[in-house]
Image (spheres, rainbow, N blue to C red):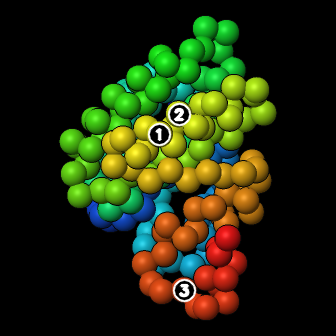
Amino acid sequence: MKNFSGMNKLSKKGQTVFFGSTSLSQMDLGDLMGNSCSTHIYNRSKDGLTIDRAQKEMEECACQLQPSRLFINIGEEDIEKEDFTIDGFISKYEWLLYQLHTRCDTCTLYIISVMSDSPKTAKVNRELSRLAKDTGCVFINVAHNTPWSFLASVKPFIRSFPISFAEAMQYAG
């Protein structure tokens, strides 16, 4: 696993942080975002990160940076486990969100849907959407596990400046 403590000492606090598992750890978010935002983006995601491991890694991967925006994408490894239960997963996720809310008190938390081909994914994402509403977070549903789909889903939440009319029409439903 990557050790981010040294990098965190050189990082600017109050920026945008991504904290997730394998799919997110493999995306070069800085390159994907390009000049579309005026904030630093730190990807503190780790291959194989489970909800249990996230509890242990959250200090180094998120809290030390005191982000203004924290995007969380955890669950793709959990959903594949034989002993996985949705209730158990959501309970642990809720505890993680509580800890992040108390440790990063000026931060907006964004829950990114689980990106998996598992038949359980739709139900897990419905529960994560409900959990986001119940805990004051924002739920972002990423329809497909591709960098461009991910970018299109997340980009509107990262911007710190107004978008053009043409760009707004892309997001109109």
* 41 over 3 or under it: above or below: below
| Residue corresponding to mark 3 | 163
Q: Is residue 8 visible?
A: no
In the image, what residue type sits under mark 1?
A: Arg
The image shows residue 43 at horizontal and vertical percentages of 51, 53
Q: Outermost residue, bottom direction?
A: 165
126 up-or-down from 107: above or below: above
**In this view, which residue lies farthest toward the front?**
173
Residues under numbered marks 2 and 3 in contact, where contact means CB atoms less than 8 Å apart: no
Secondary structure of the residue carrying numbered label 1: helix
Q: Which residue is mark 2?
A: 127
Query: Tags 1 and 2 in contact by the CB under 8 Å rule?
Result: yes
- Name the one closer to the observer, 138 or 4: 138
Q: Residues within 10 Å of mark 3 (few under 14, many from 20)?
A: few
Q: Is residue 127 left or right of residue 60?
A: right
Q: Which residue type does callout 2 highlight? A: Glu
In the depicted view, which residue is nearer to us: 171 or 16? 171
Residue denoted by label 1: 130
* Left or right: 6, with 116 as reference point: left
